[in-house]
Amino acid sequence: MKKFRYILPCFLLGLTLSSCNGFLDKEPWDSIDTSKSFQAAEDAIAAVNGAYQPLQWPKLYNMRMWTLDIVAGNSIVGAGGGTDGIETTDMANFITTTDNAGVLDVWRGPSPGILRCNFVIKNVPGMNIDQSLKNRCLGEAKFLRAHYYFILVRLFGGVPLLTEPQTSEDDLKPFRASKEEIYKLIEDDLKEAINLLPDKSSYSASDLGRASKGAAMGLLAKVYLTQRKEYAEIVRLCEEIQKLGYRLNDDYSDNFNPNKKNGPESLFEVQYYGKTNYDFWSNENQSSWLSAFTGPRNSDMVADILWGGPRVEPSRLPSLSASTKKGIIVKIRLFFIWDVLTLTESNISLLILQRDTICVSFWSRNPSLWITIPVRPTLWYSVMRMCY
């Protein structure tokens, strides 16, 4: 009996310890073990796809990047008055404070993309996958990292320079690098991307929109031009881009046709799904907000619903070929036209006379009172951007 009394506690203790070990030995569910994330080719592609995603977010191209056109003075907020769009108005007037939502967005927006690019650049070289796919994934990550840093350096000058994935053990308040150091990284990344990336023509239809050799050349030329240097190299890069088959669209309106994305003029485009499978305002950000924000309110010009009722995309704008004669393109309701005059609730009709000369007809609530004003070609682009 004594022997049994000794054995039973030992058995229960062993059972308890084994149960505790089994209970406590769990993988964390709140994070992903990245050491196991880069095994197959599909993992590399998925990681690169994730590096593109922040481009689609409102902090970047789904809102803040195109509102910088307002900051540049090419357009105005419009909005609904009061504080509607006040962060962009303050940015345009250079009176921002540290809590300005627009400034915070463009400051924070590129960081997730840079982190994801760094994961690809660190892990993909050691993968046992097809070399051409490995080169492409690395080239895409280099291009995207350069793109994200190019956004930051133009807006803020020197910023923290991160080329390795950060962890909780790293210094999460890194020092600010100089503007020259950031530009050097951008240039080095783009030069590597040019050597690694395939031509746009080699992509299948399902992969169109990925970074390509031409996109990297074009961005590097723009980087040099922004710094006002290497003019001979800029010319050479542009000539090389032409040799890759890029050209202007025969029909200018194809640039605004949702059925003709990634056309022969396109070096690089941020991709959106363009259909109604996703909620328009959802966090998936698969619908571009540009047309909804820049289209006129209470109209049927653009997709989905925005403050005033349903809107639909026009199926196609008329051709702007040289043979086009006078005819109405589109009749809309606007509140402002750049560099012409400011009106309040005026009906506007755009008339094409020829490819590079546009007239805008204004008339008041009294149809007999109207004027026609010639418009510069540059104004036409602004009008198009607002209308479509």
Image: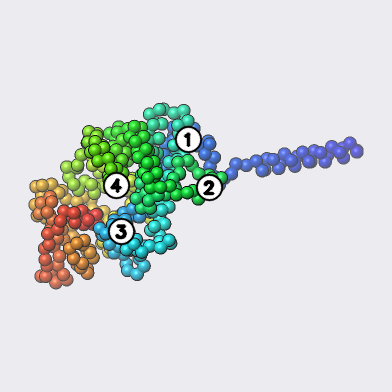
How many angstroms separate mark 1 from mark 2 (CA)? 21 Å
How many angstroms separate mark 3 from mark 2 (CA)? 34 Å
Which residue type carries mark 3? Answer: Val
Foreground disc of the pair 1, 2? 2
Closer to the camera in the image, 139 or 292: 139
Residue under label 1: 123
Which of the 4 quarters of the picture holds residue 22?
top right
11 to 366, vertically: above or below: above
Badge 2, how many Cα within 10 Å: few under 14, some, many 20+?
few
Confirm whether residue 27 shows in the render. yes
Give the position of the N terminus as an image quadrant: top right
178 to 70, vertically: above or below: above
Badge 4, how many Cα within 10 Å: few under 14, some, many 20+?
few
Residue under label 4: 226
Give the position of the C terminus as an image quadrant: bottom left
How many angstroms separate mark 3 from mark 4 (CA)? 18 Å
Residue pictured at 27% horizontal, 40% vertical: 230
Which residue type carries mark 2? Answer: Asp
What colour scheme was applied to this rendering of the protein? rainbow
